[in-house]
Amino acid sequence: MNEQPDGNDAVTNEEPPVLVARDGHVTILTLNRPESRNAINRAMRRMLKSELRRADNNPDVCVVVITGAGSSFSSGVDLPEALAGPPPRTEGTTPTQVLRAISKPVIAAVNGPCYTGGFELAVNCSFIIASDRARFADTHAQLGLLNGWGGSALLPRAVGLPAAIQIVLSGQPVDAQTAARIGLANEVVPHDKLMERTLDVAQAIAGGHAGAVQRMLRLLKEGAGASVAHALGLEAEAGVTFRRDNADIGARFGDKRRPESY
């Protein structure tokens, strides 16, 4: 894994708020303010949006992974900074709007506490793989705030309305095992295996046909919020407009049938 720091950060001795690394066709973005439990400040929001767009525009990148430095995924928006200055809503496009707009799958590798704005960030990813040390909580309502990064729209679709109501209104943490049981996280793995397992899944996705992966991701996302009839219409339309390469399909099929021991 070769780290590729953003060029704008090369002129300063300070650690960038997001570390950028590549593992083959996978870009890894690490929220990097461990001293504040990776609280999401303005600089982190700017860099996160920039790196997500950069990955989306790079044909050599097939999958993005987001995780946190240190023992936390993220404690949420840097509230002292937000209360002392212009609120995040004045900054235009939010990181989660960029997340929802890009064409490539984004996996949240949740390595520890994942709260409030950090929780919304993870919920906006394509799916979550959690460490057994992960904890999820949304404390907006407890603090007198409202969701602004899509949490109230996406969480009920992931876990169902009753569970979403309990999580959002109570502010109580949900442990990793419960998160997997209710559908918030796809998997729970031992903490020291989190990145290994996440990259294993990411590389499996990256090994697929890039065009088909992106089109299927779009179909799944658009169809999830539609009626069955409309989702079937989207699938039929995609089947007509998607240009397949029969020679490439045949070669891939042959590779898949070949025993791993060969």
Image (cartoon, helix red, strand yellow):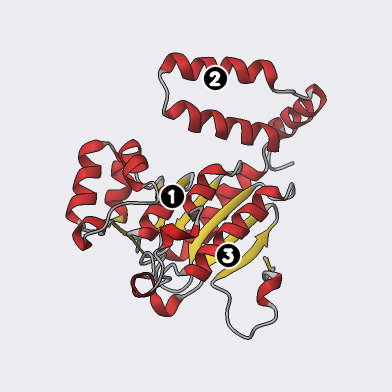
The amino acid on which the numbered mark 3 sits, given as a three-letter code, is Met
Q: Residues within 10 Å of mark 2 (few under 14, many from 20)?
A: some
Q: Residues within 10 Å of mark 3 (few under 14, many from 20)?
A: many
Label 3 element class: helix
Q: Residues within 10 Å of mark 1 (few under 14, many from 20)?
A: many
Label 2 element class: helix
Q: Nearer the viewer, residue 54 or 81?
A: 81
Q: Residue at x 27, y 50 (%)?
A: 178
Q: Nearer the viewer, residue 102 or 26?
A: 102
In the rendered view, does 111 fall on the left or right side of 2? left
> Looking at the rendering, in which quadrant would you find the N terminus?
bottom right
Read off the residue under disc 3: 47
Label 1 element class: strand
Mark 3, mark 2: which one is toward the viewer?
3
**Which is more N-terminal, label 1 or label 3?**
3
Mark 1, mark 2: which one is toward the viewer?
2
Q: From this view, report whether residue 33 is shown above or below residue 193.
A: below
Would you say residue 55 is visible in this rendering? yes
The amino acid on which the numbered mark 1 sits, given as a three-letter code, is Ile
Q: Residue at x 58, y 83 (%)?
A: 14
Read off the residue under disc 1: 128
In the rendering, which numbered label is found on residue 234?
Answer: 2
Picture quadrant where residue 138 is located? bottom left
Q: Nearer the viewer, residue 22 or 20?
A: 20
User: Distance from label 3 to label 2 (Cα)?
Assistant: 34 Å
**Which is more N-terminal, label 2 or label 3?**
3
